[in-house]
Amino acid sequence: PNEEDTQPGNSGNSGRKQLTKKINGVVVDAEDSMASRSDLTAVRNTAMTPLRPKDKEHFSIRMSPYKFAERAYAVVEFYAKCDAVEQIQLLWDLDDYTDQENKEVEEVMGKIGNGKVVLDKRRGTTLHDKFDLKVAPPTYGMLMVEDEIVFACDALKMGFYRWTRHPERLVGYEPRLHKENAFQWEYASYTDAMSANRYSMVRLSSTFIHVDYLKLYINYLPRSMYDAIVDSKKCEGIAMSLFVSALTGGRPPLLVDYWATQSRVVLYSPNGSRSDTRRVTLHSCVDTFATELDLRYKHMKIQDARLFHGIFSFGVKVKEDVEEGDNIIPEMSEEEKKVRKRVSRLNSNNVLDKVGWIKKDLKAFMTKRGLVEDTDPWKKKYGISKSRSKSKSD
């Protein structure tokens, strides 16, 4: 009753398809997926463990860095200074770093982690390991992040406060969309979703989630999906987004305020981006996973929702959404009031300029470390000439 603009699907044929599919050459077995559905049915609409008082004040971070120790250190150092962060679990694959980096990481974390970092060292990790917690976090709220994109602390807080009021939902920063075609359901990027002004999924690498879902994923994700992700090394984020929708009646995730989504800084990736995935593979994942999770049919069909309402209302509208100029909602903590007050002067005309101010400290922090492309510290650190940088931007 508190949500608007959701609807089952967005176009095309919803008939049941042949279940034996391939994802990046990996066969998803129909018989195995059918056998797992009874397990999935048993956990639909599972009640999340109720939040305690501390779960409404602080959250934990589960971070999966990608082969660039210096960038991982910078992101950890920045997030460790955010007062709402209780713990940072750093998933560290020993195979991705040099022997020297593996030796020094604990010492570095001790210096910059503000006592918040828990190292989760493993070797030969799979994409599922980001959901497989060896150490129970001190909070039920977990922010899943990677280290290529970082958000301002106030933006994280606003996503967290929204999540505390809806802990059974994902709350994300980067919307994605599924598109229903007669031949194959497809994956649509952020740009595609913004153009259509609809969304149904989120990119998991910047999303708040209840830790109960991490356990449910490991224990109840259809085995065929689990194995296909291990073998193809892709699509775990799509799987989790659709998995939570399957457990909550096909509803899409929630999103943070629009202004908060714009407070991000993209960091330099000398090893390339892990998100550089062939679109055809993402299409196959969406198409197959929707079938595996029964998200094509009747009352369980995945819903999409209107995306942009205003800078303080992005995605599915919920009761606490405010209009421009407002900054008070019911059951607001004192800390949330402070953040709301800081952003209350934002409006549709000044949002881009004001968001630049909100992420000023973040951008300065990362620029100083040579992690923001096309800045002087970055050019100096990596020997990039101004002419080369200009030709790249052209």
Image (cartoon, helix red, strand yellow):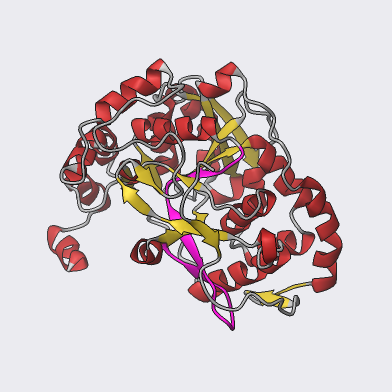
Depth check: give the residue in front, 62 or 314.
314
76 lies above or below 54: below
* Displayed quadrant of residue 183: bottom right
Whether 343 is among the magenta residues is no
Q: Which quadrant is home to the C terminus? A: bottom left
Asked if 27 appears above or below 366 in the picture, the reply is below
Give the position of the N terminus as an image quadrant: top right
Residue sitting at the far front:
1
Rendering coords of residue 93 (x, y %): 60, 46
Residue 347, located in which quarter of the rendered image? top left
Q: Residue at x 40, y 25 (%)?
A: 82
Horizontal side of 372 relative to 286 (left or right) equals left
Residue at figure coordinates x 75%, y 77% from the top left: 20
Horizontal and vertical percent position of residue 17: 71, 78
Q: Is residue 192 above or below residue 218?
A: below
Relative to residue 378, is residue 234 depicted above or below?
below
Q: Is residue 124 visible?
A: no
Q: Quadrant of residue 198?
A: bottom left
In this view, the residue in front, 62 or 7, is 7
Find residue 133 and report its horizontal and vertical position in percent. Answer: 68, 37
Which x, y percent locates residue 173?
42, 46
Please tell me how many numbered marks the rendered image carries: 0
Residue placed most toward the observer, 15 or 219: 15
Left or right placement of residue 386 versus residue 166 in this view: left
Which stretch is magenta?
168-189
**Does residue 283 appear anywhere in the picture?**
yes
Residue at the farthest bottom position: 183
- Closer to the camera in the image, 144 or 369: 144
In this rendering, position of residue 358 left or right of residue 74: left
